[in-house]
Image (spheres, rainbow, N blue to C red):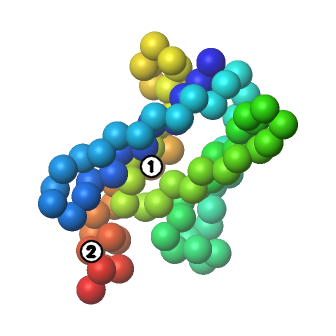
Amino acid sequence: MYALKIITVKNDGNPVECVTALGDCYRLEFNPAIADPKVVARVHYTKDDNTPCIEINRGNEAFITTLDNKTVRVICRADMAFETSLAS
């Protein structure tokens, strides 16, 4: 079983961690910066009869982990310079 862990730093500086269970199989799509400069990747997984998609932004830290919290793949390290340039 795999999980997606996304860590976002809010405006007040506090990190918020969100963990989503992906199940046994997931599809990871990396997004070229030309297509959408904010989105680094998309993770598709199956839930019941649906295929939800989670977008990972450049300002987030994102990891695919096992359910016992061992990192399998690092998707993105937070790019705070990019987020700052978007805000201004």
At x 33%, y 70%, the residue is: 83
Disc number at residue 84?
2
Q: Please give the residue where the numbered disc 1 appears in the rendered image.
A: 76
Residue, x 77% and y 44% (percent of image)? 51
State the mark number for residue 41: none
Q: Amino acid at mark 1?
A: Cys
Q: Dot 2, crowdedness within 10 Å: few (<14), some or many (≥20)? A: few
Question: Which corner quadrant of the image does residue 82 belong to?
Answer: bottom left
**In front: 86, or 79?**
86
Towards the viewer: 67 or 70: 67
Question: Is residue 1 left or right of 6 when viewed as pictured?
Answer: right
Of the image marks 1 and 2, the number of the one nearer the N terminus: 1
Query: Where is residue 50 shown, x and y percent of the image?
Result: 79, 42
Q: Quadrant of the N terminus?
A: top right
The answer to whether one can see residue 77 in this image is: no
Distance from disc 1 to disc 2, alpha carbons, whole Å, reads 17 Å
- Residue 28 location in percent, x, y? 66, 44
* Image location of residue 27, percent across then percent down: 72, 41
Residue 87 at what x, y percent from top left?
A: 30, 80
Q: How many marks?
A: 2
At mark 2, the secondary structure is: helix
Q: Visible in this render: residue 56?
A: yes
- The amino acid on which the numbered mark 2 sits, given as a three-letter code, is Thr
Where 35 falls versus 20 (above or below)?
below
Question: In terms of secondary structure, where does tag 1 sit?
Answer: strand
